[in-house]
Image (cartoon, rainbow, N blue to C red):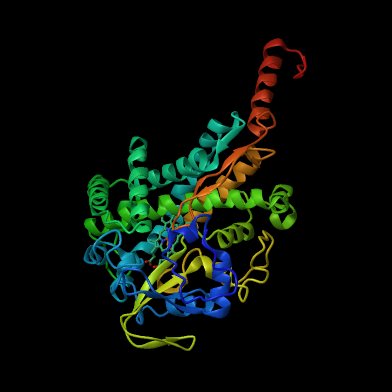
Amino acid sequence: MQSHTGPGDLTSVDLTDLALFADGPPHELFARLRSECPVHWNNTADGPGFWSLTRGSDITAASLDPVTFSSARGGIFFRPDTLIPLEVGRRDFMLWKDPPEHAKYRNVITKFCLPRTLILVDAVVDDIVTNTLDAVAQRGRCDVVGDIAVPVVATVIARLLGAPDEDIEQLNAWTRDIEQGITLDLNQSASVEEMGRYCAKLVGSQVVRGVDSLANTLAQPDGDGNRLSQSEIAGFFAMLLFVGNNHPRNAISSAVHALLENPDQLELLRAESPRMRTTRSGLAPVALEELLRWSTPVNYLARTATTDTTIAGTDIKAGDRVVMWYASASRDPDLFPGADRLDVTRDKCDPPHYAFGGGGEYFCQGAALTYRIMSVTLREILRRLPELALAGPVTYERSAFVTAPTSVPVRFDRTGSLDTQRREQDLVDELERLTGKTVTLES
Ligand code: HEM
């Protein structure tokens, strides 16, 4: 990894250089930027450059002012045309929209967070996690990314969208195309269009059949009579398909890696002290927040200044691009005392992290769903894979956009797995019933 951690010039730092992200985000470099140059001009080899914000307070201020810091004007990635042409993003996806148009989407989409939708999801998450862990618990080793996080999250999202399980491979392929498009600055219009057609079909069939589904929930008008058209819902589905599939899987995989690198914290969770006691639904919320802070899955999103302004005393010109580094803000010691220490018992901070953005209008609408998936999956990993340890090198995607483990190989004691014990006890019970005698495992 290129080093920008020692004393020296920060002016040449280019955060679009993927070499900096070979092992995840460059946290030491972010620490220097926060303290020495928190509003940093980043020259790029072949573009106009951008301002990098690395402190939490500056990112919060920019996020809370979408009129000055626009998502629509130049899109939300390093370059306006990354992934898809800017006009397509603005037309089809709410993340590219500014107020007041954004509010129409937001109001209707908050329905997505209604308890009813979460109850729908609740009903499937436990089952999916149990089935996935059933498949690995007997093996004694597995890859947390490919064997647990990817299948669990993709299956939950498929169920939420009403997509059949046999399409999951295709959903994962599109998710990969989009992530690569953003990371490598590729035009992936073909995949996005294909995904859009798929989602339109899915939405159309659910709305026509009137089935109890997310599409139909979203098709209902909000309190002001605003409603989304089928094609707008399809655009929303396409976005959910990517963000819902990509980010939670990265959050789960990174969380397991973080706990294995910090065994004292893993022990705290396993010991279930009163503060850490798992709720019925999974891991203690305080621990989840800390794991999201530690490995903030979306590293950055961008805005464009609509007018001349200043951030922390630095002049920003209308039209300048501004990149908000959430991965850095989540480690800002001004907001999180001892920020470079993973502490699953950390006292509540406000905000708890920047994983779901800088707050305000664009705060992640999938936060509740993410907590639910993460919480149940991590609870079951801790419960059913005893003696969990790393079994090889952990690798990360070279990406400035996401913190995405590509492999977290682990081993565990398969004979001690609760699943094995449960099966053995079932066997004992059955033998006792058949023989009418007391049976022990040794006998
Ligand atoms: C660990 C998981 C996740 C992370 C790290 C994450 C991150 C984010 C971030 C940073 C934003 C802010 C966008 C901005 O300011 O421009 C956002 C917005 C959003 N997220 Fe998530 N997200 C996650 C999971 C999900 C899930 C599971 C869903 C839905 C299935 C979802 C749906 C959304 C939506 C709809 C918005 C747009 C909100 C708006 O424009 O008003 N997210 N997310």
Snapshot quadrant of residue 139: top right
Image coordinates for residue 132, horizontal then vertical, percent: 51, 36
Closer to the camera, 47 or 315?
47
Residue 435 vs residue 98: left or right? right
User: Where ligand 1 lies, by quadrant?
Assistant: bottom left
Q: Residue at x 45, y 73 (%)?
A: 12
Residue 170 vs residue 401: left or right? left
Snapshot quadrant of residue 35: bottom right
Q: Residue at x 47, y 63 (%)?
A: 299
Q: Residue at x 22, y 59 (%)?
A: 229
**Picture layout, residue 193 above or below residue 12:** above
Snapshot quadrant of residue 315: bottom left
**Picture layout, residue 133 above or below residue 42:** above
Inspect this view and state whether residue 83 appears: yes
Q: Residue at x 33, y 72 (%)?
A: 71
Inspect this view and state whether residue 222 appears: no
Closer to the camera, 87 or 370?
87
